[in-house]
């Protein structure tokens, strides 16, 4: 029970940090979204290297890198993971920077349901009746948003799909959270360096002192929530983690409405209501399945 409570605290802390990240990106309004992405990659890599050295895991990390890069299949999965998380980061930064925090929150509300879709199609996992209804409700909500705005919520879909694909690819890899993040940023590092040398509108770290410090801090605000999340996942059930997960998009939606004063109509509220209903049904179905599985296992032990 003590470990579970610790896991809950770590999980909530991770998702609260992810929830307030839009505030951080808003402080970097003078910097282009693509530049923020590549600064995030560079400083995340630097921060993770320092972290690995501080916890005295450098030798183990080098051995893991050597073993991963010796397998073409594994290397392919890592490259895909790096690409998907970079797409997710850029879309999120761009959405926040251009006043579309509501779209960002929608993307992360949709993420668990996209996970279900991927599991059903590619992993041949069975989707129960409640899960099917949940996905239909979410689809109705997205369709309503399309009809209300007159356009497909591309940014939301890209965020949901890219993060789901990132998680899907990561399932094929057995590595620690800090090793994974370090290698992913290492893979994207040459692209970032090429950008700063040939395409960046400003020299590397050529902004004011305050902006430079914030850009360096991007590595910290990226790495810490990921590591907290990984530790939480070791201590609490997937179901409980699923409940906590909705702290993130809920905070973003509240910021969008009350702090950034983004347009939020009654029609949007009804559309989001279908998505929330889908989430409630999906969570309920997951809990029921978990209870049945526990009952089956306890009967088997008897």
Image: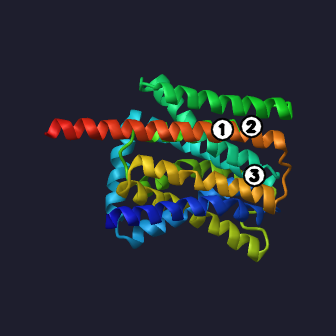
Give residue 275's mark: 1
Q: Mark 3 or mark 2, which has the lower sequence index?
A: 3
Q: Quadrant of residue 298?
A: top left
Residue pointed to by mark 2: 271
Kindly identify the residue that appears in the image at 33 percent across and 64 percent down.
3
Disc 1 and disc 3 in contact, CB within 8 angstroms = no
Helix, strand or loop status at disc 3? helix
Distance CA(mark 3)–CA(mark 2): 16 Å
- Which is more foreground, mark 3 or mark 2? 2
Disc 2 and disc 1 in contact, CB within 8 angstroms = yes
Residue 283's place in the image compared with 152, above or below, is below
Kindly identify the residue that appears in the image at 50 percent across and 57 percent down.
226
Kindly identify the residue that appears in the image at 41 percent across and 37 percent down.
288
Q: Quadrant of residue 23?
A: bottom right
Relative to the observer, which residue lies in front, 104 or 195? 104
Relative to the observer, which residue lies in front, 232 or 1? 1
| Res. 197 in view | no
The percent coordinates of residue 86 (x first, y second) are 61, 46
Neighbour tally class for label 3: few under 14, some 14-19, many 20 plus, Cα within 10 Å: many
Residue pointed to by mark 3: 101
Disc 3 and disc 2 in contact, CB within 8 angstroms = no
């Amino acid at each position: 029970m003590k470990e579970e409570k610790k896991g809950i605290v770590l999980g909530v802390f991770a998702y609260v940090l992810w929830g307030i990240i839009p505030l951080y990106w808003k402080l970097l309004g003078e910097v282009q979204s693509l530049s923020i992405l590549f600064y995030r990659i560079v400083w995340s890599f630097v921060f993770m290297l320092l972290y690995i050295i501080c916890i005295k895991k450098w030798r183990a990390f080098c051995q893991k890198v050597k073993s991963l890069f010796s397998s073409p299949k594994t290397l392919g999965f890592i490259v895909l993971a790096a690409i998907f998380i970079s797409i997710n980061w850029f879309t999120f930064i761009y959405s926040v920077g251009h006043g579309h925090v509501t779209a960002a929150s929608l993307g992360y509300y949709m993420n668990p349901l996209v996970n279900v879709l991927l599991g059903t199609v590619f992993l041949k996992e069975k989707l129960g009746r409640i899960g099917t209804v949940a996905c239909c409700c979410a689809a109705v909500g997205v369709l309503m948003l399309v009809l209300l705005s007159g356009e497909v919520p591309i940014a939301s879909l890209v965020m949901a799909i890219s993060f789901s694909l990132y998680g899907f690819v990561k399932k094929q890899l057995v590595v620690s959270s800090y090793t994974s993040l370090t290698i992913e940023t290492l893979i994207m590092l040459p692209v970032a360096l090429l950008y700063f040398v040939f395409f960046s509108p400003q020299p590397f770290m050529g902004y004011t002192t305050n902006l430079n410090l914030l850009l360096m801090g991007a590595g910290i605000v990226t790495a810490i929530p990921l590591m907290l999340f990984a530790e939480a996942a070791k201590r609490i059930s997937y179901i409980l983690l699923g409940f906590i997960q909705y702290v993130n998009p809920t905070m973003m939606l509240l910021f969008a409405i009350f702090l950034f004063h983004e347009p939020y109509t009654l029609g949007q509220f009804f559309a989001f209501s279908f998505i929330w209903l889908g989430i409630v049904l999906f969570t309920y179905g997951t809990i029921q399945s978990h209870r049945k599985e526990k009952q089956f296992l306890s009967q088997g032990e008897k």
